[in-house]
Image (tube, rainbow, N blue to C red):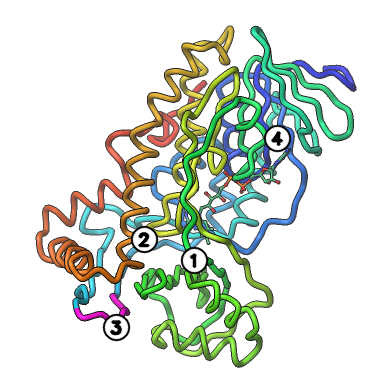
Amino acid sequence: MGSSELTADVVVIGGGPSGLVAGLAFASAGFDVALIARTAPADNRTTALLASSVAALDTLGAWAEAREHAAPLVGLRIVDATQRLWRAPEALFDAHEIGLDAFAWNIENRRLIAALERRAEAMPNLHRLTDDAATVEPHDDSVIVRTASGQTVVAKLAVGADGKNSLCRTAAGIEVQSRAYPQIALTYNVSHSRPHRDISTEFHTEHGPFTTVPLPGNRSSIVCVVSEADADHLKSLSGDRLDRELERRSHSILGKINADAGHGAFALAMESARRFASDRIALVGEAAHRFAPIGAQGLNLGLRDAAALAEIAADYRDDPGQPHALERYDRERHADVMSRTIAVDLLNRSLLSDFLPIQGLRGIGLHLLNTVGPLRRAMMREGVMPRAAQPRLMRGEALS
Ligand SMILES: Cc1cc2nc3c(=O)[nH]c(=O)nc-3n(C[C@H](O)[C@H](O)[C@H](O)COP(=O)(O)OP(=O)(O)OC[C@H]3O[C@@H](n4cnc5c(N)ncnc54)[C@H](O)[C@@H]3O)c2cc1C
């Protein structure tokens, strides 16, 4: 590789978790990879990594470090905290019921990213450019990426892992279907006086879920989905007032709360790219899909994108950006992404809806899940280990 023009098989754009995993997956499959990723401080979000995502990270050699900072989610509790006439019964799901030690492992994104970056540094065929992609130009035989500092990368395939305002998506001419929600997700990381007992609790309110997710020790992350007005109110609180408010909203299940300094704020939307690949550019993670943080699906889908794309590309080793490869990627990811997007959208809108029959249906659904064992176990398995889409990495199989 020269200093101002680099040649690689694959160029990955974006150093969030999806981009780093894509870079590692391609490098582990033997491709020469350029990763264009600025070093930006991670926000305070955490990710509940499902068992299949953990298997992929383990196979890529990044889990040993991440594991030290992750907490298992053995129980998932859903509490209907709305004031509505028809309220759903409380539901508690236990991972042991489907033979798992844990549904997921929750980790702060900054810790996950650090572990992935360390692993990426150790890969001799993964070259990181700490830079921004300024332009992405697809051509018949290659894609050319120019960076903000003037470097050029020529590759067969560009992987757009550049998040919700994806430059790669625009360069590929891919349109987005979107729906904005009148909701903001505020994120906090907190210490608390009572143990979480490895249980994540989702309180469903009229404006969205208030979710506590275990972190190691007596610590948890909180995702609080609220209206814009309520978000302004919460953002104005600090110190004891904020701690008391978070304790009140969590119904004191974690005892006294002490929030870390700072919070994250995310305007919620459902966005889905109309295609996941075109013109030598394939999209992974939030560049391809985004939805409300319900049921810990977003990044897990992003990791499945990265694993599936690298696996398909390995079948087209001479030209991983050729149309056959991209069509296959688009086809194979469609059902998984769309089914999760629709399910999360429906669940979120059922919370926001004041329409009584919809409240009733949600209640009946949860009641059935609570009482009908086979249905509950099937739903748990589908949420954690989707049958439709399990790329090899997610099954713990190496790509090389
Ligand atoms: C409140 C909240 C809680 C969530 N909890 C969970 C959860 O528990 N489980 C789960 O699976 N998912 C969860 N998600 C979803 C998850 O956080 C996202 O899916 C995930 O962060 C997306 O990662 P990404 O790498 O695709 O995108 P990003 O993290 O947005 O990364 C994109 C990267 O691209 C870089 N970039 C952008 N443009 C350029 C450019 N031109 N050149 C170079 N780099 C560029 C950016 O700097 C950034 O680093 C949650 C989301 C929210 C909002």
Q: Determine the secondary structure under disc 2.
A: helix
Measuring 77% from the left and 47% from the top, which residue is drawn there?
39
Query: From mark 1 to mark 3, how far is it between C-alphas?
Result: 18 Å
Q: CA distance from mark 3 to mark 2?
A: 16 Å
The answer to whether residue 303 is seen in the rendering is no
Q: Amino acid at mark 2?
A: Asn
* Label number found at residue 83: 3
Q: Which residue is mark 2?
A: 348
Q: Look at 36% across and 39% down and name the residue there.
A: 338
Q: Determine which residue is flagged by label 4.
A: 122
**Pointer 2 or 1: first along the chain:** 1
Residue closer to the observer: 396 or 32: 32
Distance of mark 2 from mark 4, alpha carbons? 41 Å
Q: What type is the residue that disc 1 sits on?
A: Gln
Mark 4, residues whose alpha carbon is within 10 Å: few (<14), some, or many (≥20)? few
Q: Relative to the observer, which residue lies in front, 19 or 126?
A: 19
The answer to whether mark 2 and mark 1 are in CB contact below 8 A is yes
Magenta region: which residues? 80-85
